[in-house]
């Protein structure tokens, strides 16, 4: 029995009053991340990878690294960072982690760096440090990462050109029948296979990059001076210098050491200088933009990062065939992430704002278009999107296993005054639809005082479990894991 057939009874069981299956449901599906292949025997190049993660979800990221890469992680004292060691061959799998925002390869870490009290002396020490750092292997890792990224970009452009050429042929009157379409699909599959083969060859080659950073050469042999910038992140009140001063002086030494050209915007290499009290970590960035930019193309005023959505979903430990609902989905970050990573569950998203529902639907379609060529026998994504009233949900009592939602903070959406009425009503209705005894909810809010008061009034329905303190756009917020009690919730309607 197919997954779609298994999930169909769940739809009929859950949706009451409104039954809408998203038109994209039965189209192309999502790619399930594969487990990383074990490092080949004799592989020499390894890397210590640093990853920035949503604050509060460091342990979640460490668990994912252990599960998918088989590597133990160390959580940094500087919140929002973890470190782990992997073979350089595992770089593609590292980029497929769902809980990390940005990646960098560690050049060297100092756990108890003694800064001089005098500003000039402290900055001079940072300058002198550049010549002492072991740059060779980290730069090889950067080169390998860069070569894989360039090849992927070239392959993508080639695919687009091939598609455009085929469309032009059809437009000019050439026959575009079944045989031609099948040939096109076969060509796409062959191109994708070639990309995978190339990746394996590159990994086996170690550092066979198109651009040798140390030599400043391109693949064609033309001389090229790499452009770079230094980014300093500093935390602590005992430093005699500012972040800009450290970046300036450290960057000057890097420029002199490598003979690179400084460029703050159009750079090839980004050197990171992370200073947290007496901890100093020097690294080289492996990501140009945050990995959380993966699912959302249509943004709203409070769109949640996909990495934070993943952490929230993982906190409630979804099991196969669980029914997961986001009653205030906004642009759909949480349910889309859930349907992508937990396709054996059935996800329902809803919002009272028609514009938000439209954005979420557009994001679902964009994701499907991006993934439509990845699997020939796809099942779509098990996700429905509905416009509804959070306080009067068209869902049967006790039919939902998990509720995951980003509640209105009362800043950009709603107001703190309205939250005093909204939060208790939401918790009551969530308690009604959630399965007694086994149901759970993971809710994010920055209006912690209002939420605590509402939860105290709903103590007979919800028991507070774990609390994760997070930073959302500079706001100090909290993620609450709630457990549904066995207490029967109030029945509001009697039409079933």
Image (cartoon, rainbow, N blue to C red):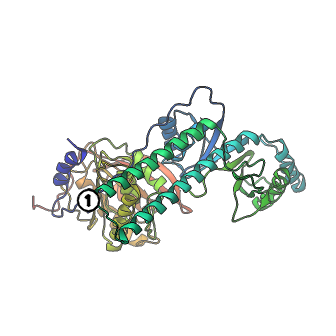
Left or right, residue 219 beside residue 353? right
Q: Which residue is at a point 51% across and 43% down the rendered structure image?
A: 61
Left or right, residue 447 beside residue 219? left
Mark 1 secondary-structure assignment? helix
Judge whether 415 appears above or below 260 on screen. below
Residue 129 rendering spot, x and y as whole percentages: 83, 45
Seen from the viewer's position, the closer of residues 211 and 258 is 211
Left or right, residue 59 beside residue 131? left
Residue 85 visible, this angle:
no
Residue farthest to the front? Answer: 174
Q: Which residue is mark 1?
A: 429
Tell me the quadrant of the picture where the C terminus can be found: bottom left
Residue 394 visible, this angle:
yes
Residue 303 rendering spot, x and y as whole percentages: 45, 64
Seen from the viewer's position, the closer of residues 68 and 44 is 44
Label 1 crowd bin: few (<14), some (14–19), many (20+), radius 10 Å: many
Numbered disc total = 1
Q: Which residue is at a point 30% across and 53% down the rendered structure image?
A: 380
Tell me the quadrant of the picture where the N terminus can be found: top left
Seen from the viewer's position, the closer of residues 383 and 398 is 383
Residue 199 rendering spot, x and y as whole percentages: 54, 43
Residue 241 rendering spot, x and y as whole percentages: 81, 58
Q: Which residue is at a point 33% across and 57% down the rendered structure image?
A: 180
């Amino acid at each position: 029995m197919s997954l779609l057939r298994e999930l169909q009874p769940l739809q009929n069981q859950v949706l009451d009053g409104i039954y809408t299956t998203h038109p994209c449901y039965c189209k192309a599906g999502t790619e399930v991340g594969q487990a990383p292949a074990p490092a080949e025997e004799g592989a020499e190049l390894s890397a210590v990878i640093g990853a920035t993660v949503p604050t509060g979800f460091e342990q979640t990221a460490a668990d994912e690294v252990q599960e998918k890469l088989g590597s133990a992680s160390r959580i940094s004292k500087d919140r929002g960072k973890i470190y782990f060691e992997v073979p350089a061959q595992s770089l593609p799998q590292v980029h497929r982690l769902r809980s990390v925002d940005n990646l960098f390869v560690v050049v060297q870490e100092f756990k108890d760096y003694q800064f001089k009290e005098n500003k000039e002396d402290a900055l001079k020490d940072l300058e002198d440090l550049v010549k002492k750092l072991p740059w060779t292997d980290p730069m090889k890792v950067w080169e390998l990462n860069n070569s894989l990224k360039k090849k992927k970009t070239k392959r993508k452009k080639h695919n687009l050109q091939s598609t455009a050429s085929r469309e032009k042929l059809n437009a000019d009157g050439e026959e575009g029948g079944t045989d031609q379409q099948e040939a096109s699909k076969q060509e796409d599959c062959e191109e994708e296979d070639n990309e995978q083969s190339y990746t394996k060859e590159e990994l086996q080659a170690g550092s066979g990059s198109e651009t040798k950073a140390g030599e400043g050469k391109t693949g064609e042999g033309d001389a090229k001076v790499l452009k770079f910038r230094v980014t300093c992140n500093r935390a602590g009140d005992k430093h005699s210098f500012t972040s800009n001063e450290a970046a300036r002086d450290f960057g000057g030494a890097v420029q002199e050491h490598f003979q690179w050209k400084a460029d703050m915007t159009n750079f090839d290499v980004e050197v990171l200088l992370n200073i947290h009290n007496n901890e100093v970590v020097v690294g080289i960035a492996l990501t140009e933009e945050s990995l959380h930019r993966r699912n959302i193309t249509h943004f709203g005023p409070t769109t949640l990062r996909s990495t934070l959505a993943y952490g929230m979903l993982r906190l409630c430990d979804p099991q196969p065939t669980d029914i997961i609902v986001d009653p205030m989905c906004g642009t759909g970050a949480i349910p889309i992430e859930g349907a992508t990573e937990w396709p054996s569950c059935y996800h329902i998203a809803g919002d009272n704002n028609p514009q938000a529902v439209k954005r979420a639907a557009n994001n679902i379609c964009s994701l499907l278009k991006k993934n439509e060529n990845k699997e020939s026998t796809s099942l779509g994504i098990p996700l429905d999107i509905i416009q509804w009233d959070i306080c009067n949900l068209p869902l049967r009592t006790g039919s939902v296993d998990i509720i995951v939602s980003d509640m209105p903070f009362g800043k950009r959406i709603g107001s703190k005054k309205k939250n005093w009425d909204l939060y208790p009503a939401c918790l009551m209705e969530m308690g009604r639809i959630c399965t007694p005894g086994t149901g759970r909810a993971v809710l994010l809010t920055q209006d912690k005082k209002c939420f605590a008061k509402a939860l105290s009034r709903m103590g007979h329905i919800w028991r507070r479990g774990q609390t994760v303190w997070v930073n959302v756009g500079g706001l100090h917020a909290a993620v609450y894991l709630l457990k549904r009690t066995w207490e029967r919730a109030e029945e509001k309607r009697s039409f079933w």
